[in-house]
Amino acid sequence: MAFSFSGLISNDVGIDLGTANTLVYVKGEGIVVNEPSIVALDRDTRKVVAVGAEAKEMLGRTPSEILTVRPLRDGVIADFEVTEEMLRYFIKKVQKNKFLVRPRIVICVPSGVTGVEKRAVRDSAERAGAREVFLVAEPMAAAIGVGLPVDEPVGSMVIDIGGGTSEIAVISLSGIVCHRSEKIGGDEMDESIVQFMRRTHNLLIGERTAEQIKCQIGSAFPMEDELEAPVKGRDLVANIPRTVNVTSEEIREALNKAVGAIVNAVRISLEQTPPELASDILDRGIVMTGGGALIRGLDRRLMEETELPIHIMDDPLTCVVKGAGKVLEDLNGYRKVLF
C-alpha cells in the first residue's frame, strides 16, 4: 500500500541525461522537458544564473563575470556539482507535489559507463532530490522506445548517435549481447567543422555556428542537389567579421573522419555479433536513433558500407527518453534491463 501510495503522490521521471540535450519524461504525462545541457554560472560565487535553453542563448556571448558550462562530456559527468544543480532545476520544473514524496528516477547512461561514472550519476540524482535511482543503457532505452522486442530471443541492432557518444548495441533476451561506445558524436562533428573553417577559410567560428552549419548543409553521402550556406565569423588574417559561402561538399569533407569512425565501429560490432543474431539483423536491419541520425545521407553511407537495411526512426531525438518512460511505467516488467 505504501509503495502504491508513494507512486500516486510523486511525479516519477525518466531522464535522458545527454551531452547536448536533457530530456525529461514524467510518468502519466510524457515528455515535458527538452532543453540543452548547459548551465550559466556566476564566475565568482558559482551561483546558477540560467539553465537549459536560456543558458544556450548566452553561449559565446557572456561578459567576463558569467561562465557557461556544459557539465557532461562524452556522455558522462565532467562537472559533478553543476550536473547536480542542472538535475535539481529540471526535477523542480516538473514536480507538482514539491512538498510530498520525492520522485523515483530512471536515468539513461552510455553502455560503456564505468562503475565510478554510474556512482557519479546516481549520487548527483539523489542529491538533486531523487528517492530512488535506476540506470538503463542508452541503446537499450532506445530499443524499448522504438518498440523493438528486447525481451524475445531475437537479435536487434541499435545505433544511437548522441552529442558526446555513439552507442552501438546488439540486444536479445533483455540483455546487451555486444556493444561499442565510441566517444564520437555531434560535438566532435561540430569541432571538426570549426577546425575545417579555420584551416580552409581562415575563419574563426563558434560552437553554435558550427552546429547550425551541420544541421543546414551537413551530409555523410553525396547528394543529388548539393547545398550552400553563408557562414559568418572572424577573419583570422584581417581580424574583422567576414562572411564566407560554404558548400555541402566541403562540410562532408569536414565530417568524414567522424562519420568514418562511426561506420568502422558498426563494422566491428557486426564482426563480434554471434552468427544466429547476425542472421536476425540481416532480416530485420539496423535501427538508428539520436540526433546524429538526422545527418543527411548517413543511413545511405551505412547501407552502402554494411549492405544491411537501415531504419531511421520518427523523431529519433526522443527515442531514448521514451524508452526510459516505458521502463518507468513498468519497473517490475523491465527489471532485467536495469543496471
Image (cartoon, rainbow, N blue to C red):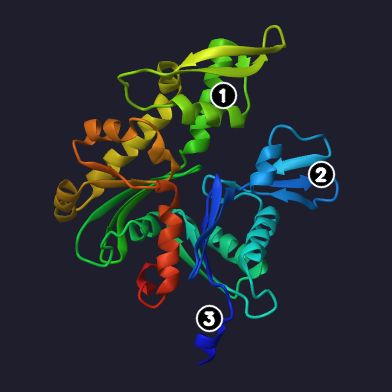
Identity of the residue drawn at 31% across and 64% down: 175
Which residue, given by chain and number where applicable, does mark 2 sit on? 43
Disc 1 or 2, which lies upstream in sequence?
2
Rendered image quadrant of residue 240: top right
Identity of the residue drawn at 82% across and 35% down: 64
Disc 1 or 3, which lies upstream in sequence?
3
Give the percent coordinates (x, y) of residue 197. Answer: 55, 17
Q: CA distance from mark 1 to mark 2?
A: 26 Å
Amino acid carrying mark 2 in the image: Arg
Single out the residue that lies furthest toward the top: 238
Single out the residue that lies furthest toward the bottom: 1
Image height of 233 relative to 97, above or below: above
Identify the secondary structure beneath mark 1. helix
Give the percent coordinates (x, y) of residue 161. Answer: 41, 43
Which residue, given by chain and number where applicable, does mark 1 sit on? 194
Give residue 7's mark.
3
Amino acid carrying mark 3 in the image: Gly
CB-based contact (under 8 Å), mark 1 and mark 3: no
Identify the secondary structure beneath mark 2. loop
Identity of the residue drawn at 47% across and 55% down: 113
Single out the residue that lies furthest toward the front: 29
Regarding residue 125, the answer to whether it shows in the image is yes
**Numbered marks: total:** 3
CA neighbours of label 2 inside 10 A, class few (<14), some (14 to 19), many (20+):
some
Rendered image quadrant of residue 81: bottom right
Identify the secondary structure beneath mark 3. helix
